[in-house]
Image (spheres, helix red, strand yellow):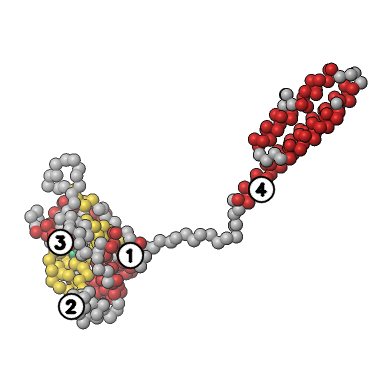
Amino acid sequence: MTEHLEQIERQALGELESVQDDEALQRWKVTHLGRSSPLMKTFDGLGGLAKEERPVVGRRANEVKRSLETAFEDRCQALRQRAIQHALAAERLDISLPGRPARRGRLHPTTQTLREMYQILGEMGFQVYLSREVESDELNFQLLNFPPNHPAREMQDSFYVDTGKPRGDNPLLLRTHTSPGQIRAMREFAALNPQDPPPVRIILPGMCFRYEQITSRSEMQFNQLEGLAVGPHITMGDLKGTLSDFAHRMFGQQVRSRFRASHFPFTEPSAEMDIECFVCGGEGCQVCKRSGWLEILGCGMVHPVVLRNGGYDPERYSGFAFGMGPERITMLRHKIEDIRYFWANDPRFLEQF
Ligand code: DAH
């Protein structure tokens, strides 16, 4: 009988060695330690043995049982360890490798131009004033002295905002220029001290929208940078000095500039400012269309009606204003031939700046 037990043990331990996974391990346990395993059967058969054989076989059977249980636990442990080792090897992480560099983006070319402008005008004492992109017809046109049927309105065809209500005579629209911010800013400043409004020296950057045919020269969405200075003794000389100085700092100290008479409803007199073509130095080339000059902005002395609409008495105050297109200026500087590149979001274009 004890020999039979030896054989059971040898057989079981032998089989255990070839067990490679959990499933086989469980099967082994049922076969060799389960209710109907040969080992358990010997316990059942103890009662039928001779009296003196019983304790000997019983003890031996218990030893075998313990030996199989221990072997089972060891095998369990070994398999678990092996699984961990496998996982560690397969998912090895070399923390000494250099990290993947984060891809750094860069500023949009228009933003770069705008920031240069803020820097220069900021040093001259202009503060950035942010105005809204959705405006009313009143602020975008009427208070800026555009009469209802003024032809300039047609030059700035608008995107109207559908409010679900009849349009009426003061519809909402996407601002066609940054100039309505002049009225908002003056009113805000004037409200600080209505009897004696403080001087104003601000720049108003931001997106403008026009319902326009998109071509290489005009987009329906573009930035403007507006400037406004209002105070007790502001003259056309201040306008010319400020803008000439701006042009020198922006385009180079040697660059000459000139003012041409023009017309805007919100300024009187009005002018356009040209700088000497920095591509050909004034000789005449493709960029300046053989004229030697590049137009960079519109400007003028703030119209008395606009001053009054902003809460400033035109008898006591005067001011100058200007407006320029950062995309246009970026195009001139970098000889970009198509304004549509700015919002096309093509990295091949954006990466160049
Ligand atoms: N608002 C004008 C436009 O969009 C640009 C402009 C011209 C602004 C003259 C000004 C100015 O402030 O004085 O075409």
Please name whichever residue, 351 or 242, is drawn nearer the observer in this view of the structure: 351
Crowding near pointer 3: few (<14 within 10 Å), some, many (20+)?
A: many
The label nearer to you, 2 versus 4, is 4
Residue for point 29% across, 62% down: 342
Q: CA distance from mark 2 to mark 4?
A: 77 Å
Please say whether residue 233 is visible from this viewpoint. no
Q: Which residue is mark 3?
A: 266
Q: Secondary structure at mark 2?
A: loop
Query: In screen coordinates, is 121 left or right of 286?
Result: right
N-terminal of the pair, mark 1 or mark 3, is 3
Crowding near pointer 1: few (<14 within 10 Å), some, many (20+)?
A: few
Q: Secondary structure at mark 1?
A: helix
Q: Which residue is mark 4?
A: 85
Q: Which residue is mark 2?
A: 290
Q: Amino acid at mark 1?
A: Phe
Q: Secondary structure at mark 3?
A: loop
